[in-house]
Structure formats: structure tokens, C-alpha cells
Amino acid sequence: MNISIHYAFLPHTDAEAALAFYRDALGFEVRNDVGYDGLRWLTVGPEGQPQTSIVLHPPATDPGITDAERQTILELIAKGSYAALTLASDDVDALFERLVERGADVIQEPIDQPYGVRDCAFRDPAGNLLRINQAA
């Protein structure tokens, strides 16, 4: 049996800012851009890897949550405590520089970790934590 990750979901609070980060800064291709009732869902992913995608979705849209719960979710997203994703690159330093040049919010510059990877960290425009690893 083979299991793979097809979609991962991250909230976005501004579709255009999300596109600028994921498409323009990270270089992901846009696979789908769906609007409905004033909201937007964006599906992006690395070129040449059509089997793996990230769906950037409007947060807190479930009609079953209260206004207070919605506000809590938005606050957690803004703090970077709601969602996270780890990406991999064969050149974390070059990718770090590209993201810095495009104004990304740096959390951690590239460092060699004691567990065998070199990594760095950013927040996307919504506040989601993105770590980028490179195998040693």
C-alpha cells in the first residue's frame, strides 16, 4: 500500500498577499483559484510536483463557529500559532536570500541543526509558520 500527501491546507487572510508570497516569492504554480460568495480558495504547489498541493483557504468560514471563536482563530493565525508547514529545498541559503529580497517575514536565518538539517523559518502574509529544511 502506498500513501502520499495530496493536499495540505493553510489559512490565508489576504488572497493577493498569499499569491505574492507563494507564487512570486516561493515560485509555486497556481493550480486553482476559486471564488465563492466573496471568498477565495487558492491551490498552489511546486512546479513538477502535481501530486502535492497547498490549498490556501479563507479562515473561520464554518457557519457552526461563533463570532468569538472566529476572532480567536484570526488572532492565533496572526500570531503564527494556528498552522505550520515544513518545506524542503536543495539550497536553503539561496531560497532564504530570495525570500528576504521579496520582503518575507524572517523568523530564523539558516542554521545547521544538531539533528542533521540546515533550516530557516518564515511567516507567510497570514502569519503561518513555514520552516524550510535542507538535508545535511
Image (cartoon, rainbow, N blue to C red):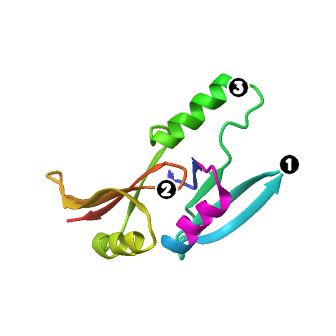
Quarter that holds the C terminus: bottom left
CA distance for labels 2 and 3: 24 Å
Residue at 50 percent of width and 50 percent of height: 1
Mark 2 sits on what residue? 124
Q: Residues within 10 Å of mark 3 (few under 14, many from 20)?
A: few
Name the spot of residue 110 as percent of width and height, x first.
Answer: 25, 63
Query: What amino acid does circle 3 point to?
Result: Asp
Q: Residues within 10 Å of mark 1 (few under 14, many from 20)?
A: few
Residue at 65 percent of width and 30 percent of height: 70
Name the spot of residue 65 as percent of width and height, x first.
Answer: 71, 25
Which region of the structure is painted magenta?
11-23
The circle drawn on residue 67 is 3
Label 3 element class: helix
Q: Which secondary structure type mostly characterizes the magenta part of the structure?
A: helix
Of residues 101 and 64, the one nearer the viewer is 101
User: Closer to the observer: label 3 or label 1?
Assistant: 3
Query: What amino acid does circle 2 point to?
Result: Asp
Residue at 65 percent of width and 42 percent of height: 59
Name the spot of residue 113 as percent of width and height, x first.
Answer: 18, 54
Asked which quadrant contains residue 96, the reply is: bottom left
Asked which quadrant contains residue 99, the reply is: bottom left
Of residues 96 and 100, the one nearer the viewer is 100
CA distance for labels 1 and 2: 24 Å
Query: What amino acid does circle 1 point to?
Result: Asp
CA distance for labels 3 and 1: 19 Å
Mark 1 sits on what residue? 37
Looking at marks 1 and 2 on the same chain, the residue that comes earlier in the sequence is marked by: 1
Label 2 element class: loop
